[in-house]
Amino acid sequence: VIGPSGGGGSPPPPPPSTTPTITSFAPQSGTVGTMVTINGTNFVAGTQVSMPGLNGSPISLPLQSLATTAVAVVIPVGAATGALTVANSGGTVASATSFTVNAANTFTLSASPASATLIQGQSVAYSVQLASANGFNQLAQLSVSGVPSGVTAQFKPATITAGQTSVLTLTAPAGQAVTNTNISVSAAATVTGILQTQTALAALAVAAPTTTLLGRTVVSDSLETPLAGVTVTTMGL
């Protein structure tokens, strides 16, 4: 730069950047109502924070505090797992990792027995139970997969909540193929817009009919009347 007098000069330095940056945030996950602190730079007046909503559109996060290097926000109802976005007059930046929105209430699922045998032309039943340690009280829809082709499955009832039991009955036709497989019992429910699913595994063996002795209690028969055509031996006697 040459001035009127012939002297030289240097251009003025560029103005400092006001584009926000995100270096970290904590916690990394939580339920609706969790307060999250975002650390970074250039958090100036007018800064806004957003994240994905359950309907796919961005949703604003209420600010609790604002400083140049940190901003605190609360996860609102309707938020979905995704990156946190900070925007102000200097620009917009998104976090490199996502905040995970957890459901406030969850449940566990179990199925018993762990393994069962289904005889051709017969039925077998599993007990399916739902439990919760944090107040889940909605109805969860039950389903099952992995059932061999030809075998019919029925839940009774088809929806249960924590503390309840459903009976899953599997029925095989007389000509059902003999096989060993695993079935997967699932329960699904939507909690504050978040789909929650749990799965329990059980073994299933489809077997051909065999001769079986089943014990049962009957009225005492002092005459010890024999069963026609049946001979029972035990220990060789």
Image (spheres, rainbow, N blue to C red):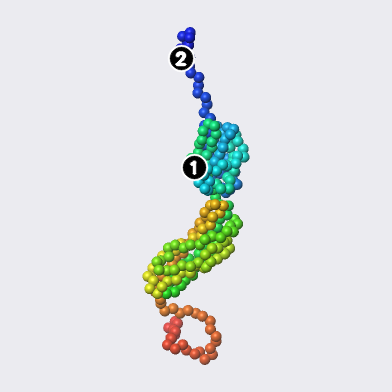
Dot 2 falls on a residue whose secondary structure is: loop
**Would you say 229 lies left or right of 102 here?**
left
Q: Image height check: is 41 above or below 58?
A: above
Q: Image height check: is 70 above or below 157?
A: above
Q: What residue is at 50 percent from the left and 21 percent from the top?
A: 13
Could you say which is closer to the camera, residue 63 or residue 219? 63
Q: What residue is at 51 percent from the left and 35 percent from the top?
A: 92
Front tag of 2 and 1? 2
Residue 79 marker: none
Residue 235: in sight, yes or no?
yes
Residue 69 lies, in percent from the top left, at: 57, 34
The answer to which of marks 2 and 1 sits earlier in the sequence is 2
Amino acid type, callout 1: Thr
Residue 78 lies, in percent from the top left, at: 56, 48
Q: Which residue is mark 2?
A: 1
Residue 98 lies, in percent from the top left, at: 50, 44
Residue 120: in sight, yes or no?
no
Q: What residue is at 44 percent from the left and 65 percent from the top?
A: 203
Marks 2 and 1 sit apart, C-alpha to C-alpha, by 47 Å
Dot 1 falls on a residue whose secondary structure is: strand
**Would you say 202 lies left or right of 27 here?**
left
Which residue is most to the right? 64
Q: Residues within 10 Å of mark 1 (few under 14, many from 20)?
A: few
Picture mark count: 2
Residue 76 lies, in percent from the top left, at: 58, 46
Amino acid type, callout 2: Val
Q: Image height check: is 27 above or below 67?
A: below
Q: Residues within 10 Å of mark 2 (few under 14, many from 20)?
A: few
Q: Quadrant of the C terminus?
A: bottom left
**Would you say 209 lies left or right of 24 here?**
left
Q: Which residue is mark 1?
A: 97
Could you say which is closer to the camera, residue 215 or residue 74? 74
